[in-house]
Image (spheres, coloured by chain):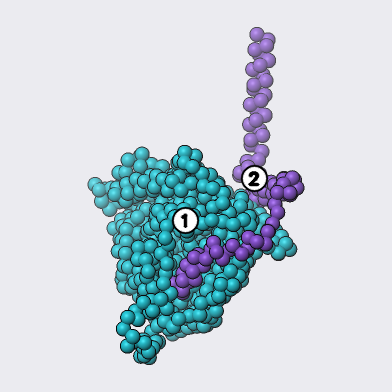
C-alpha cells in the first residue's frame, strides 16, 4: 500500500512502523543471510596457515574488488543522509564533494600507492616512522586518526543509520543505534579484512541497485529531470512565520531555496560552498582521506599488483560519479515533494517533526524511502542503508583496532603476545563505540542540523596538517623529522583554535546566528582548510631547512623520486630504538613452562574452541614461514613493476574518466 | 573643439556597439554558453593540456634515459637482513588484523 506522495498537511503525524509486512522482512533477512554467507565463505577461503595468507588478505584482490571496496568503505549511511539533506537545503553544490574525489583517487593510485607498496609498509604510521624516524609522529598520527574516526566517521554513520531506522520503524534514536551496533559488532568481530573486502563487493551492488530504484521512483514522482529544476525554486514550507516574534524573526533567505541552487561553482564570498574551497579545499581534505588514511590504504595494499590498484582506483572514480544522481538529486526531490517537513524552518515545528529545532533536512532521504517505495523494495532500501553503514563501520572498526593495538598498545606493552593484542583490539572496539554513542547529540545539533557540513568542517580543521606532511614527505626529500612533527603540532594548534571556538559558541542556525567572533569563525571552513594546509607546509619546510637533512640511504623506496631505486635501505626505525618484539605464541608458552607438570596440551572444552574459531583467535602455533619464503613474499609485496600493455590500458582509462569528470563539472558549473 | 566632438562620437559609437553585442547572446540562450558546450570546451582544453604534458614527458624521459639503471643482483639478498624485523612485525600484524 503506497503512502500518498502528495505534500502532506502540516499536522500529519510522524510515520510510524512502515516495515511490518512479509515482503520487507523477508528481503531484509535474505540480505543478511547473503552477506554473512559471503563473509563466512571468504573466512574459510583465505587459508591462514600458508605464507600467502599472512600478508593482507592474501594479497590477491582483483581490481574490481579493490574498486568496489574503496567505494563501499567511503560511502556510509552518512552520505545518504548527509548528501541528500544538504542537497535538499542548499542545492547541487554538495555533489562537488564526491566529484572532486574522482581526481584525488587517481592521485592515490598513480602517485602515492607506488611509494607505499615499494616501501613495504602496512599502516600509515609505519610508513611515516620509516620515512622520518623517531616515534612521536607515528604516535601522534595514530591518536589523531582515532580521534577523527570517532568524531567524523563512526558517530556520523551511526547517527544517520539511526535517523533512517527512526523514520522507518519509529524507534527511539538510541535504541536504533544500539541495535545497529550489535549487528555490526557481530560482523566485525568474526570477519577479518578478507571478509570485509569480499562482502564490500556485494554491498556495493546492493547500494547502487537500491539507490537506482529509489532514484527512478523519485524522478517519476516529481515528473522528470527538467521538472526537478523547475519545481525546486518553489519548494517552500507553508509555515515560515515566526511563532514568537519577541524571540526571533525568520528572514526570507532562511527558507527560500538559494538562487545558485543549481550551480556547482558558487560565489567565493557569499556562497555556502565557495568555488575555491570546493576545488582546492576538498582536494586537500581528499589528500588526507584517500592518500593517507589507513582505511583506504589497507584496501589498495591488498591488491594483486600495482596495475590492479590503478584499475581499482579508476573503477572507484567511475562509481563516484553516481552519488550526485543517487543522493543529491533525490534529496532535492524530497524537498519538492515534502517541503513542510524536509524544509521546515520554524523551530517548534522542526522539533515536532524530527526531534531537533535547527532543521530537518537530514530526513530527506529516509522520507523518500518510507513514502515512495512499495513493499519489499522498502525492505531492500533498509538493507541498502544497513549495507552502507555496516561496511563503513566494520572497516573503520577493523582499521582503528589495528592502529590502536599495533601503534599504541604494542609500543607501551612490550612483550605482549599475539592473543593479548587481539583481545585488546576487540575491547578497544567496544570503547570507541561507547564514546561514539555519547557524541551523537553533538552531531545532531551541529552545523544547523546539516550533517554533511558537520563532517566536512571537523575534517577541515584537523586533517590538512596530516595531508600536508604526508604529501611533503612523499615528494620532498628534504623534509626532516623535526619539521614534520612541529608542522603537525602547529597545524593541530591552529585547527583546534577554530574547532573549539566553533563548538563552544555553537554554529548556530539561520534564525539564531552564532556569536562566534569573526576572527575565529568568519572564514568558511573550506577556505580555512586551504589556509591551514599552506601554513603547515610553510612551517614544515622552514623547520626542515633549519635542521640537518635525512641521508639518502635511509630514503630509498620511501619517496617518489626514489621509488624504483634498488639500493640497500637502512631503516630509521631500526636504528632508533629497540622495537617492541611481539612474542610468538610459542615463546609465551615456553616462558610459562616453569612448572613442568603442565607440559601436556591443555584440553580446551568444545565451547571455548568454538568461540575461539568464531572470533578468529587461533591458539595452535601456526607454521612460521621459512626465511626464503619471507624474502620471496617481501619481494613480491614491494614489487611495483607493471606489464606495459595493461599499464597503458589503465592510463587511457584514467584519462577518459578525467574527461568525463571535467565535462560534468563544466556542465553543472 | 572639433577633436573633442570626434572623441565624443567615438565613445558614443563604442557604447552603442557594446550594448547591441550584449543583447544578442542574451536573446538566444539566457547565459553566455550552453552548459554542454561549456563541458565540451573544458574537455578539449584538458585533452590539449594532457597532450602537451605527454610530449614534454617523452622529451624529458629521452634526456634522462641514461640515469635509470636497474639491479645489481647482490642487493636483493639484503632484503631479508634489513627488513628482517619488519617481516616479523608484518606477520604478526596480519594476525592481529584478522
Q: Residues within 10 Å of mark 2 (few under 14, many from 20)?
A: few
Determine which quarter of the picture holds residue A635.
bottom right
Does residue A173 lie above or below B36 as drawn? below
| Label 1 residue SS | helix
At 41% from the left edge and 72% from the top edge, which residue is drawn? A583
Q: Which residue matches tag 1?
A: A575
Image: B57 above or below A651: above
Q: Position of residue A83 (x, y in %)?
A: 47, 59
Q: Is residue A610 left or right of residue A282?
A: left
The percent position of residue A27, horizontal first and vertical second, equals 47, 81
Which residue, given by chain and number where applicable, does mark 2 sit on?
A: B33
Report if residue A499 is visible in the image: yes
- Kindly identify the residue that appears in the image at 35 percent across and 48 percent down: A496
Residue at 29 percent of width and 58 percent of height: A348
The secondary structure type at the circle numbered 2 is: loop
Eye-nearest disc, 1 or 2: 1
User: Residue A184 appears in which quarter of the rendering?
Assistant: bottom left
In this rendered view, identify the residue nearer to me: B8 or A388. Answer: A388
Residue A522 location, quadrant: top left
Q: Which chain is cyan?
A: A
Residue A261 image point, x, y percent: 50, 51
Which colour denotes chain B? purple
Judging depth in this view, the residue of A664 and A69 nearest the camera is A69
Whether residue A210 is visible to the viewer of this picture, yes or no, is no
Amino acid at each position: 500500500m503506497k503512502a500518498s506522495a502528495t505534500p502532506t498537511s502540516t499536522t500529519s503525524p510522524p510515520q510510524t512502523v512502515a516495515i511490518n509486512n512479509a515482503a520487507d522482512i523477508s528481503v531484509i533477512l535474505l540480505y543478511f543471510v547473503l552477506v554473512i554467507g559471503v563473509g563466512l565463505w571468504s573466512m574459510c577461503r583465505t587459508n591462514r596457515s600458508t605464507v600467502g595468507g599472512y600478508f593482507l588478505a592474501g594479497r590477491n584482490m582483483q581490481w574490481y574488488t579493490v574498486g568496489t571496496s574503496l567505494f563501499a568503505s567511503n560511502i556510509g549511511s552518512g552520505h545518504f543522509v548527509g548528501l541528500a539533506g544538504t542537497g535538499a537545503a542548499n542545492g547541487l553544490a554538495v555533489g562537488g564533494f564526491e566529484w572532486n574525489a574522482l581526481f584525488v583517487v587517481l592521485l592515490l593510485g598513480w602517485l602515492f600507492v607506488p611509494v607505499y607498496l615499494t616501501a613495504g609498509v602496512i599502516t600509515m604510521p609505519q610508513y611515516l616512522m620509516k620515512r622520518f624516524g623517531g616515534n612521536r609522529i607515528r604516535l601522534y598520527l595514530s591518536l589523531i586518526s582515532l580521534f577523527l574516526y570517532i568524531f567524523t566517521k563512526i558517530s556520523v554513520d551511526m547517527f544517520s543509520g539511526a535517523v533512517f531506522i527512526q523514520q522507518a520503524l519509529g524507534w527511539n534514536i538510541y535504541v536504533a543505534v544500539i541495535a545497529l551496533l550489535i549487528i555490526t559488532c557481530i560482523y566485525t568481530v568474526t570477519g577479518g579484512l578478507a571478509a570485509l573486502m569480499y562482502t564490500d563487493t556485494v554491498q556495493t551492488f546492493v547500494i547502487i541497485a537500491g539507490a537506482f530504484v529509489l532514484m527512478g521512483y523519485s524522478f517519476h514522482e516529481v515528473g522528470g529531470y527538467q521538472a526537478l529544476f523547475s519545481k525546486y525554486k518553489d519548494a517552500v514550507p507553508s509555515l515560515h512565520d515566526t511563532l514568537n516574534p519577541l524571540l526571533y524573526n525568520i528572514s526570507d533567505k532562511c527558507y527560500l531555496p538559494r538562487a545558485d541552487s543549481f550551480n556547482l561553482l558558487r560565489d567565493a564570498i557569499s556562497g555556502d560552498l565557495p568555488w575555491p574551497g570546493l576545488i582546492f579545499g576538498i582536494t586537500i581534505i581528499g589528500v588526507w582521506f584517500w592518500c593517507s588514511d589507513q582505511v583506504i590504504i589497507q584496501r589498495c595494499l591488498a591488491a594483486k599488483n600495482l596495475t590492479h590498484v590503478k584499475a581499482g582506483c579508476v573503477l572507484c572514480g567511475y562509481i563516484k560519479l553516481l552519488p550526485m544522481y543517487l543522493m543529491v538529486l533525490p534529496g532535492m526531490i524530497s524537498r519538492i515533494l515534502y517541503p513542510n517537513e524536509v524544509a521546515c524552518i520554524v523551530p517548534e515545528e522542526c522539533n515536532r517533526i524530527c526531534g531537533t529545532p535547527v532543521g530537518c533536512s537530514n530526513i530527506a532521504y529516509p522520507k523518500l524511502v518510507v513514502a515512495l517505495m512499495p513493499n519489499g523494495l522498502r525492505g531492500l532500501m533498509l538493507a541498502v542503508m544497513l549495507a552502507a553503514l555496516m561496511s563503513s563501520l566494520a572497516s573503520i572498526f577493523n582499521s582503528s583496532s589495528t592502529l590502536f593495538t599495533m601503534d599504541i598498545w604494542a609500543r607501551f606493552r612490550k612483550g605482549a603476545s599475539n592473543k593479548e593484542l587481539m583481545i585488546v583490539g576487540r575491547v578497544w572496539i567496544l570503547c570507541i563505540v561507547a564514546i561514539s554513542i555519547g557524541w551523537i547529540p553533538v552531531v545532531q545539533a551541529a552545523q544547523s542540523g546539516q550533517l554533511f557540513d558537520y563532517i566536512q568542517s571537523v575534517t577541515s580543521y584537523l586533517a590538512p596538517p596530516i595531508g600536508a606532511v604526508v604529501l611533503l614527505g612523499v615528494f620532498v626529500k628534504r623534509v626532516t623529522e623535526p619539521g614534520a612533527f612541529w608542522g603537525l603540532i602547529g597545524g593541530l594548534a591552529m585547527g583546534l583554535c577554530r574547532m573549539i571556538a566553533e563548538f563552544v559558541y555553537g554554529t548556530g542556525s539561520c534564525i539564531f546566528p552564532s556569536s562566534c567572533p569573526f576572527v575565529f569563525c568568519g572564514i568558511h571552513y573550506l577556505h580555512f582548510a586551504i589556509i591551514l594546509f599552506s601554513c603547515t607546509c610553510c612551517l614544515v619546510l622552514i623547520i626542515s631547512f633549519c635542521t640537518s637533512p635525512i641521508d639518502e640511504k635511509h630514503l630509498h623506496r620511501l619517496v617518489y623520486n626514489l621509488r624504483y631505486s634498488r639500493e640497500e635501505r637502512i631503516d630509521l626505525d631500526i636504528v632508533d630504538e629497540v622495537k617492541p618484539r611481539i612474542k610468538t605464541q610459542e615463546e609465551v608458552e615456553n616462558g610459562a613452562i616453569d612448572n613442568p607438570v603442565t607440559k601436556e596440551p591443555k584440553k580446551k572444552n568444545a565451547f571455548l574452541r568454538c568461540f575461539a574459531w568464531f572470533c578468529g583467535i587461533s591458539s595452535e602455533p601456526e607454521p612460521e614461514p621459512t626465511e626464503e619464503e619471507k624474502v620471496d613474499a617481501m619481494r613480491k609485496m614491494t614489487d611495483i613493476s607493471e606489464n606495459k600493455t595493461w599499464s597503458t590500458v589503465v592510463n587511457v582509462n584514467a584519462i577518459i574518466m578525467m574527461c568525463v569528470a571535467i565535462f560534468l563539472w563544466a556542465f553543472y558549473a | 573643439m572639433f577633436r573633442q566632438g570626434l572623441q565624443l562620437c567615438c565613445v558614443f559609437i563604442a557604447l552603442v556597439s557594446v550594448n547591441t553585442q550584449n543583447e544578442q547572446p542574451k536573446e538566444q540562450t539566457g547565459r553566455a554558453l550552453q552548459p554542454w558546450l561549456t563541458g565540451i570546451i573544458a574537455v578539449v582544453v584538458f585533452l590539449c593540456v594532457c597532450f602537451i604534458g605527454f610530449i614534454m614527458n617523452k622529451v624529458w624521459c629521452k634526456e634522462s634515459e641514461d640515469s635509470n639503471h636497474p639491479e645489481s643482483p647482490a642487493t636483493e639478498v639484503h632484503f631479508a637482513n634489513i627488513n628482517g624485523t619488519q617481516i616479523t612485525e608484518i606477520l604478526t600484524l596480519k594476525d592481529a588484523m584478522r
